[in-house]
Amino acid sequence: MIPSGLTTGTWTLDGSHSEIGFTVRHAGISKVRGNFDDVTAVMEIGPSLEDSTINAVIQSASFNSNDANRDGHVKGADFFDVEKFPELTFAVTGIEGSGETYRVAGDLTIKGTTRPVVLETEFNGVAVDPFGATRAGFSGSTVISRKDFGLTWNAALETGGVLVGDKVTISVDAAFVAAA
C-alpha cells in the first residue's frame, strides 16, 4: 500500500532540504560524521509499492567531513578514487511496509562494487508548502561494511586496533517534491 498522501508520478529530491550522511568510528574512540553535498534522486510512485522506484546518484567528490585533509584523502585512491569513480549510486529493488515504517531494499554501488542494502525507513508525511509544492519526507539508515565495497585502507594504532572502523552508518533525510 502506498503511504498516505503520496500520489503516483515523479517526485524529485530537493537537495537543499535533504542530507545523505555517514558516521564511522575513528581511532576506536570517537565517530567522524559528514555528508555528501551533491545528490540527485528521482522517485517514481506507481499504483503499488511493487511498481515504485527510487534512483539516486551521489557525486563522490562532494564528500564532506569538515576536514580538508581528511576529505582529500577519502576522495583519493585509498578510498573513493573520485577521478576513476565519480559517482555512488543507489537503485531501489523493493519496498515493504505500511504506515510510517518501511524497508527499502536496493543496490548500492561504491567504487564500482555493487551490494544489496536495506534502509530502515520512516515515512514522515506529505505537506503542501506555502508556494504550492507538494513535498514528501523520509528518514532512513543502514549500516554497511566499507570493506565489502573495496574501501580497505587503514592504519594500525600503537595501542591496538585500527584508525578507521569497518562499519559505516549511512543516514538519509530526504525531501521529495512532486512534479507540478
Image: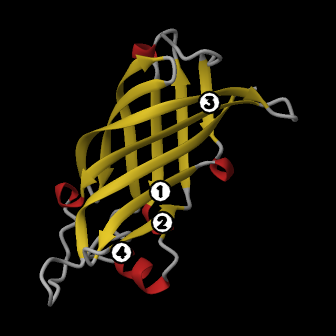
Residue 159's place in the image compared with 65, above or below, is: below
Foreground pick, 79 / 161: 161
Res. 150 mark: none
User: Does 16 sit left or right of 21 as displayed?
Assistant: right
At a point 48% along the width and 66% down the height, the residue shown is 34
Q: Earlier in the sequence, mark 3 or mark 2?
A: 3
Q: Amino acid at mark 2?
A: Gly
Q: Which residue is mark 4?
A: 74
Check residue 11 in the rendering and tell me which mark sits there, or answer none: 3
SS type, badge 2: strand
Q: Nearer the viewer, mark 4 or mark 1?
A: 1
Place of residue 122 in the rendered image (x, y in percent of width and height, measured from the top left) = 49, 32
Q: Earlier in the sequence, mark 1 or mark 3?
A: 3
Instruction: Say which amino acid is labelled 1.
Output: Gly
Decide: is 117 above or below 63. Answer: above
**The residue under label 3 is which amino acid type?**
Trp
Tell me the element at label 3.
Answer: strand
Image coords of residue 128 (percent x, y)? 78, 28
